[in-house]
Image (tube, rainbow, N blue to C red):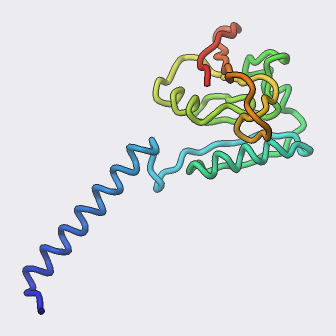
Amino acid sequence: MLQSKNDRIKTMKRFFAFMLTLGLATMSLTGHSHANPLQAKVYKDPNCGCCAIYADYLVARDYEVEVIESDQVVQMSRMMGIPEEMQGCHLTMIEGYAISGHVPLETIDRILAERPEAKAYTLPGMPMGSPGMGGVKNAPFEVYQIKDSTAEVYDIR
């Protein structure tokens, strides 16, 4: 059965409307568009493997990631106000926020949605089962917000 030109045009318009709706729905589910991925810089010790896995975790969630090897991660974290005993093994910069350690993406999404005044967040140590770490999660992840040289729990995952 042959379609008339008007029928073909209507079909194409429906198809493009569907594709536009699908694209907008995808953006609302992921929090950002594939066309404009969020950018992250991961500063890591050259000898650390889990830091690279954390970078891959961000890439898999549509972040554009630049990995920068540095032996100054501790000093950089300290400059961002993160006390040494609360630092993670790498420092990630996203949208002006310093993210220390294996902070889950759900927490980063919350930070970017709320845009708090704090400049740094940390999941201290290298907790098992956290993004980029192997093993089984054995306790909730407590992510701390560093604000005015004080640390308080910001999110529990």
The answer to which of 23 and 68 lies nearer the viewer is 23
Give the residue displayed 85% in from the left and 27% down from the top: 74
Give the residue displayed 81% in from the left and 25% down from the top: 125
Q: Is residue 100 left or right of residue 5?
A: right
In this view, 86 is above or below 41: above
The answer to which of 149 and 52 lies nearer the viewer is 52
In this view, 84 is above or below 47: above
The answer to which of 26 and 119 lies nearer the viewer is 26
Image position, residue 138 (x, y; %): 75, 26
Give the residue displayed 67% in from the left and 22% down from the top: 140
In this view, 142 is above or below 64: above
Q: Is residue 125 left or right of residue 32?
A: right
Image position, residue 23 (x, y; %): 35, 56
Q: Is residue 107 left or right of residue 140?
A: left
Q: Quadrant of residue 144?
A: top right
Image position, residue 122 (x, y; %): 71, 23
Residue furthest bottom in the image: 1
Image quadrant for the N terminus? Answer: bottom left
Q: Quadrant of residue 42?
A: top right
